[in-house]
Image (cartoon, grey):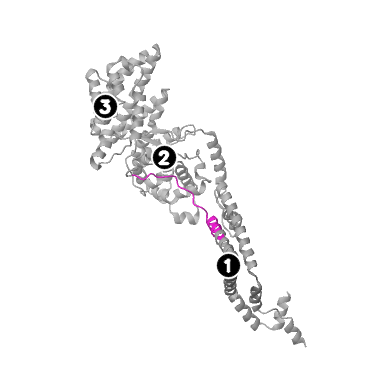
Amino acid sequence: MDGVVAASSRPAPPHSVSMFLNTLTPKFYVALTGTSSLISGLILIFEWWYFRKYGTSFIEQVSVSHLRPLLGGVDNSSPTNSNTINGEADSSRQSVSECKVWRNPLNLFRGAEYNRYTWVTGREPLTYYDMNLSAQDHQTFFTCDSDHLRPADAIMQKAWRERNPQARISAAHDALELEDCATAYILLAEEEATTIMEAERLFKQALKAGEGCYRRSQQLQHHGTQYEAQHRRDTNVLVYIKRRLAMCSRKLGRTREAVKMMRDLCVFQLMKEFPLLSMFNIHENLLESLLELQNYADVQAVLAKYDDISLPKSATICYTAALLKARAVSDKFSPEAASRRGLSTAEMNAVEAIHRAVEFNPHVPKYLLEMKSLILPPEHILKRGDSEAIAYAFFHLQHWKRVEGALNLLHCTWEGTFRMIPYPLEKGHLFYPYPICTETADRELLPTVFHEVSVYPKKELPFFILFTAGLCSFTAMLALLTHQFPELMGVFAKAFLSTLFAPLNFIMEKVESILPSSLWHQLTRI
C-alpha cells in the first residue's frame, strides 16, 4: 500500500512538458512574441536615449560600475570625472570662432618649393581659395592708405591684387626700377626665386630697404593717422622679412642663426602692440628650430610661456608638450609591462599629454604614424583640422622619429582618447567644442583631387544597442508571422521548444531512473 502511495505522489514525468506545449494556442504565441517585441523596443529606445545623452550604453555602464568590482575588476573611469567637469567649464567660458583660418607659420616658398613640386609632378599643391586668402593677407600686411604718395608702393598695391603670377612679378620689377621697394623684393623672393639661396638674397635686399622705411616712418608716426598707418605697415613688412630670413637660415642648415633671429622677433612681437604681429605665430617657428637642435630645455621654456589658456592652442604646442613628456618614458615603455604593473606617474603624465593633444587635433597621429601619406602643407591652416595636422606632421615627424620609442607610445595610446570624450565627440573634454564646419573648410584649403581629407572620428554604437535593436526586430517579425500564420508558427514553436527542452527531459529521465523513488519524493517536497 505504501508503494502505491509513493507511486501516486511521484512528480509528473518529463513528457508532461510536451503535453503542456501541445495545449498552448496560437494566441499565446502571438501574445508572447508581441510582448517580447514591445519590451525589447522599450529597452532599445532607452539605450539609445542614454547613449545620445551620456555617450555610453546603460547596460554596459551598469556592468562595469557594479558587476566588475564584484568580480575583482578595477574601475578607472572615476579619475577623469573632475577633468571632464573642468573641461566643460573651460569650454563654456571660451568664445572661439568656429572656422577661423590662420596663416601657416611654417608656410613654404611659392617659387622655390611649391612651384618646384608643380614642375616635377604636374600637380597644383595650392587651391584657389588658399591663394586668395594669401592675396588678402598680403594686401593687409603690405599696403596702407598712403601708398599713393610713393610711386613704387602704388604699383605694388596693384600688384598684390593681381591674380596672374607673371603680372605680379612684372609689376614688382617695375617698382624696383623706380626705387628700392621692400615689398617688391618680398614678392620676387616669394614667387620668382627658384632656390632658397636666391630667396634669401632677395630678402636681404628687402631688409635693407625695409629698415630705412621703418626708421623714417617711426619718426613721423605721431604726426597724424596717415603716418601712423604707414608706420604700422612698415612694421609688418620688417617683421615679415626677418621671419622669412630666419626660415631661410633654418632651411639652409644654419639653425642656431635662425633661433637667434626668431628669439629677437619674439621679443619684438611682445614689445609692439600691433595685433597683426600675433598672426605670424613666430614662437612656432622657434619651437621647430629648437627641436632640430634637440635643445629640449629651451623648448620647455617656450612652451611654459605660450601654452596658456588665454592664447589660442595649436597642434604644435599640444603635440610638442606631449613629445617632451613622452621622451621621459618612451625608451623604456612596454605595453605588456604596463598592463601587468600599471602605469607609473611619469607614464600617466605622458599618456594624458597625448590624449590632450589628440583631442585638440585627432588627425595628427595618422600622419605621424605614417598611416596616411603626407602632402605639401597649405599656406593657411584651420586649427584642429586636417590642414593643421598636415602642416604639423610635415615639419615635426622627424622630431618624433628622433626620440626613441615616442611613436610607439603614441601608437599604443592615441586611440584611447576617444573613449574618454563624452558623446557627442564634438562636445569636447579639455578644449572648446570641436567645430562642425572643419571638414568643409579643409576641403577648400586642401587639394582634394589627390588628397583624401581626414574627418573627425565618429563614436561607434555600443554592442548592447545593436543587440537590442536586433532582438527587437527579430521578435517583431515573429509576432507578425505568428499573427498571419498562427497554425504554421505554432507547429514551428512546438518543434523548437521540444528540441530546446530535449536535453532537459533526457537528464530528468536519467535522474529519475537512478534515484530511489522515496528520495525523489523527499526532494520534490523540499
Residue drawn 29% across and 22% down? Answer: 156
Circles 1 and 3, Cβ within 8 Å, touching? The answer is no
What element does badge 1 sit on? loop
Residue drawn 23% across and 23% down? Answer: 173
Q: Residues within 10 Å of mark 3 (few under 14, many from 20)?
A: many
User: In the drawing, what numbered circle is on residue 419?
Assistant: none
Estimate the x, y position of residue 115 in percent, counting from the top left: 26, 36
Which residue type carries mark 2? Thr
- Residue underneath mark 1: 485
The region drawn magenta spans 451-471
Query: Which quadrant, please, contains the C terminus?
Result: bottom right
Q: Residues within 10 Å of mark 2 (few under 14, many from 20)?
A: few
Which residue type carries mark 3? Arg
Estimate the x, y position of residue 435 in percent, counting from the top left: 47, 39
Q: Residue furthest top?
A: 223
Residue drawn 56% across and 51% down? Answer: 48
Viewer-side label of 1, 3: 1
CA gap, disc 2 and disc 1? 52 Å
Query: Quadrant of residue 33 in the image?
Result: bottom right
As for residue 353 lying within the magenta part, the answer is: no
Estimate the x, y position of residue 50 in percent, counting from the top left: 58, 50
Viewed as shown, does residue 44 lie left or right of 377? right
CA gap, disc 3 and disc 2? 30 Å
As for residue 453 lying within the magenta part, the answer is: yes
- Relative to residue 41, is residue 87 depicted above or below? above
